[in-house]
Image (spheres, rainbow, N blue to C red):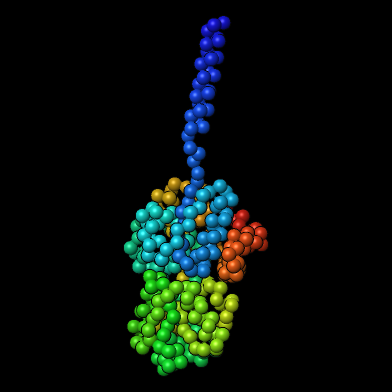
């Protein structure tokens, strides 16, 4: 009887110890850091991914910077994922530099394009007509942040077409503000542009033809991950591998976020409700 009591007491103490250990052990959280650049399509895809991952219990940290530091952060493990890699032209140099430490997870969007963009009322059609119209444009091409791949290709275009123009670096927001101001005044303006982008739904724009193919042709937007992350969290990796949007879906999401006026999460939630079947296909 005494032996039975002692065994029961030992079992109870062991159970209490196990419970105490569990209480002392910090609760593990699933954490993902997503790097992004302040480009409309990247912001839209990143906010959508964040919303969906948080619904599944992940803590999602967003790291914002210019494109070069973002590539370096993902390659070095300071961020896990970057969803806005343009290939094979725009970000080729970054993939050559960091690609051995990155895993390509997926193509998110397969009909992307970069180039020089003008309002439809501008009467030139090709890049090589810009020099003859220099006075109309003030000799300026309005660009975005200097480290962006599209800026590197725009520099190549200035060189290849021997353009007597100044390529002005700024930000996407500043470029859009300049574009809007000139369109409101029906003035000629040429900017570095890319599709998908909500500006094509707001304004009547077109790409200048690029006979020398400096800007390439159709590009793909892809997701890359740090090599270690790509094998550490199979659930999240599977989600990113299935994450893909078409032109209509991404355009609607970008437009909703651009018009959200500080209520981006509400805009994303509305978009999710309107695209439930697509969201379910992402596998979370």
Where in the figure is residue 85, as x and y percent of width and height?
A: 44, 65
Position of residue 170 relative to residue 25, above or below, is below
Residue 88 screen position, x and y as percent: 41, 69
Front residue of this view, candidates 252 and 222: 252
Q: In this view, does 104 lie to the left or right of 46?
A: left
- Which residue is farthest front? 262
| Residue found 51% across the figure and 32% down from its top | 23
Farthest residue to the right: give it.
274
Residue 280 shows in the view: yes
- Image quarter for residue 199? bottom right
* Image-based side of 92 in relation to 255, left or right: left
Quarter of the image that includes the N terminus: top right
Name the residue: 38% across, 53% down. 77
Residue plotted at (46% across, 71% down): 219
For residue 64, above or below residue 130 = above
**Residue beneath the point at 36% across and 79% down:** 155
Q: Can you tell which quarter of the image residue 262 is in?
A: bottom right
In the displayed structure, 249 sits above or below 6; it is below
Look at the image and tell me whether residue 253 can be seen.
Answer: no
Q: Nearer the viewer, residue 210 or 147?
A: 147
Looking at the picture, how far across and down is residue 254, in whole percent?
Answer: 57, 68
Quadrant assignment, res 139: bottom left
Percent of width and height locating residue 160: 35, 83
Q: Nearer the viewer, residue 136 or 238?
A: 136
- The single residue placed furthest to the top in the displayed view is 1
How many numbered marks does the figure carry?
0
């Amino acid at each position: 009887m005494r032996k039975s009591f002692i065994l029961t007491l030992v079992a109870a103490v062991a159970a209490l110890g196990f419970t105490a250990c569990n209480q002392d052990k910090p609760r593990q959280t699933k954490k993902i850091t997503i790097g992004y650049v302040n480009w409309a399509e990247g912001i839209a895809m990143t906010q959508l991914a964040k919303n969906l991952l948080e619904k599944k219990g992940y803590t999602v940290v967003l790291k914002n910077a210019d494109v070069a530091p973002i590539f370096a952060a993902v390659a070095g493990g300071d961020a896990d994922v970057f969803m806005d890699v343009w290939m094979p032209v725009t970000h080729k140099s970054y993939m050559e530099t960091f690609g051995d430490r990155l895993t390509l997870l997926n193509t998110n969007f397969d009909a992307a394009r970069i180039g020089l963009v003008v309002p439809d009322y501008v009467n030139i059609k090709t890049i090589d007509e810009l020099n003859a119209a220099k006075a109309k444009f003030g000799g300026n091409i309005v660009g975005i942040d200097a480290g962006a791949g599209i800026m590197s290709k725009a520099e190549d275009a200035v060189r290849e077409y021997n353009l007597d123009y100044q390529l002005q670096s700024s930000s996407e927001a500043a470029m859009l503000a300049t574009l809007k101001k000139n369109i409101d005044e029906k003035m000629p303006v040429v900017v570095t542009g890319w599709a998908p982008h909500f500006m094509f739904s707001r304004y009547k724009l077109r790409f200048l033809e690029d006979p020398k193919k400096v800007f390439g042709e159709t590009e793909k937007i892809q997701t890359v991950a740090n090599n270690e992350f790509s094998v550490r969290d199979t659930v999240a990796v599977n989600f990113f591998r299935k994450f893909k949007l078409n032109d209509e879906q991404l355009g609607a999401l970008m437009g909703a976020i651009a018009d959200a006026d500080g209520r981006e999460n509400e805009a994303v939630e509305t978009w999710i409700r309107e695209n439930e079947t697509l969201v379910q296909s992402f596998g979370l």
